[in-house]
Amino acid sequence: MGIDLGTKTIGLALSDVERSLATPLETLKRSKFSADAAKLLARAKEFDVAALVVGLPLNMDGSEGPRAQSTRAFVRNLGALTAIPFIFWDERLSTAAVTRALIAQDVSRAKRAEVVDRMAAAYILQGALDRLNRPHSIVT
């Protein structure tokens, strides 16, 4: 399951059973950590998720700022509630790439706002899947 953790929403995406194609799933509204974690883990259980790929919002120079630290804290707390393994995936420019693609398809601003987070989660997950399926790849 791909996760795009925002301050107001959490975008979710799933891969196919062959782990080659990511598909947007849904966007969860954020509230308190306990409620967010419960919703996220319920969806993970529903789809028998093998691992979580969490977008890590790095700065353009690769350093970690407050949002990356917040994401790490969320995942650290989530890890205490589940045995599902997770990896962080560099999500730099994922939302921008998705937004550009939606604009190119002439999607309205309102519709973009509705789908961008789950599509960003799919973009993050697809990057990890592509790396995983690359011959002789090593995922760190």
Image (cartoon, rainbow, N blue to C red):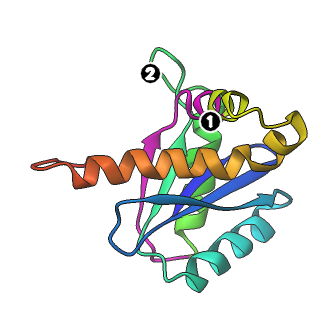
Asked where in the image residue 70 lies, by quadrant, the reply is top right
Q: Is residue 73 visible?
A: no
Q: Say if 32 sits above or below 72 in the image.
A: below
Q: Say if 41 sits above or below 23 in the image.
A: below
- Image point (64%, 76%), residue name: 43
Q: Is residue 83 magenta?
A: yes
Mark 1: give few (<14), some (14-19) or many (20+) Cα within 10 Å.
many
Find residue 86 and report its horizontal and vertical position in percent. Answer: 43, 61
Secondary structure beneath label 2: loop
Query: Seen from this angle, which residue lies furthest top?
Result: 61
Which range is magenta? 82-98
Q: Nearer the viewer, residue 75 or 42?
A: 42
Find residue 52 and report its horizontal and vertical position in percent. Answer: 48, 63
**Mark 1, residue position:** 98
Q: Is residue 46 visible?
A: yes
**Mark 2, residue position:** 62
Horizontal side, residue 64 vs residue 26: left or right: left
- Image point (51%, 17%), residue name: 60
Q: Which mark is residue 70?
A: none
Q: Is residue 48 magenta?
A: no
